[in-house]
């Protein structure tokens, strides 16, 4: 079935950080959708990353580097440059979760990057185990301070020495900065609300002081970028959460197109 190319007349509320949202807003706007950017999260670099400082000073051999997001790539690289750190990664193998992460990594590393087909920890671990032997190896995972613990735990169970390096922070915007956006939401009562992490969803509830999420979203269509976010949304009583086949904004756009085409 051929997807329609236009989302004219469709309204979308995008809750990811303003820093990340430019391409996403352009993607939906190019298809004719009306987009309200409502950032419920702000991203800031970590001031001190002791794990990276220690690894550099001790010349720890890094066997694998695993990046879970574009932000992980960006803030990891910026921290090394800012503090003039050199890690022992001469023989390291690189793993990037998602095509966008791999694309960001290509600006800093020009060798082979393994990109798993799946993003969730369970399937991801199977793919990594199939392709690599982590037993006794050191794997560095640059991440957010609120990143999920499941993946590092799975890697540790595979025998890896996991270095968790928190290179950036996710913080909620100052509530005083969003009243105008909250007022604009009245024009988006029947819209697609896109959430890209559990934090973007929970912060949305907190910023709007929503106590009954199921009731609030009953006339809206909620879209989650991945399974962990979907689970978090459903825990609050919201049902019929849409999730794309691939966990990217492009796949979300395709999913919305199909939903519109099917008249849902």
Image: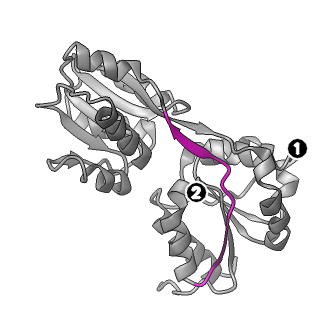
The magenta stretch is: 32-45
Percent x, y of residue 118: 39, 48
As displayed, is residue 135 above or below residue 113?
Answer: above
The residue indicated by pointer 2 is 18
Neighbours of disc 1 within 10 Å: few (<14), some (14-19), many (20+): few
Mark 2 or mark 1, whichever is nearer to me: 2
Name the one closer to the observer, 189 or 78. 78
Percent x, y of residue 149: 50, 27
As displayed, is residue 45 above or below residue 253?
Answer: above
Q: Quadrant of the C terminus?
A: bottom right
Name the one closer to the observer, 34 or 237. 34
Percent x, y of residue 83: 32, 29
Can residue 231 be seen by looking at this rendering? no
Relative side of 103 to 259, left or right = left
The residue that appears at 66% across and 55% down in the rendered structure is: 39
Can residue 20 be seen by looking at this rendering? yes
Q: Total label count?
A: 2
* Mark pair 2, 1: CA separation: 25 Å
Name the one closer to the observer, 242 or 97. 97
Outermost residue on the left side: it is 91
Q: Which mark is residue 211?
A: 1
The residue that appears at 59% across and 84% down in the rendered structure is: 32
Relative side of 230 to 179, left or right = left
């Amino acid at each position: 079935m051929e997807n329609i190319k236009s989302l004219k007349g469709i309204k979308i509320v995008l809750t990811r950080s303003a820093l990340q949202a430019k391409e996403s807003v352009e993607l939906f706007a190019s298809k004719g959708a009306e987009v309200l950017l409502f950032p419920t999260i702000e991203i800031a670099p970590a001031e001190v990353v002791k794990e990276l400082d220690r690894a550099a000073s001790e010349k720890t051999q890094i066997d694998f580097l695993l990046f879970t997001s574009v932000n992980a790539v960006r803030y990891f690289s910026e921290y090394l440059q800012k503090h003039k750190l050199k890690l022992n990664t001469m023989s390291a193998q690189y793993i990037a979760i998602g095509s966008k992460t791999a694309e960001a990594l290509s600006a800093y590393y020009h060798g082979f990057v393994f990109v798993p087909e799946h993003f969730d920890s369970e399937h991801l671990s199977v793919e990594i185990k199939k392709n690599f032997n982590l037993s006794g190896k050191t794997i560095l995972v640059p991440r957010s301070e609120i990143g999920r613990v499941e993946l590092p735990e799975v890697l540790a169970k595979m025998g890896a020495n996991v270095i968790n390096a928190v290179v950036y922070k996710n913080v909620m915007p100052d509530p005083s900065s969003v009243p105008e956006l909250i007022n604009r939401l009245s024009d988006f009562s029947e819209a697609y609300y896109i959430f890209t992490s559990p934090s973007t969803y929970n912060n949305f509830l907190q910023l709007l002081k929503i106590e009954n999420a199921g009731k609030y979203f009953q006339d809206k269509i909620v879209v989650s970028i991945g399974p962990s976010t979907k689970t978090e949304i459903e825990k609050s009583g919201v049902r019929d959460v849409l999730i794309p086949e691939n966990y990217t904004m492009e796949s979300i756009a395709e999913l919305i197109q199909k939903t519109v085409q099917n008249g849902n």
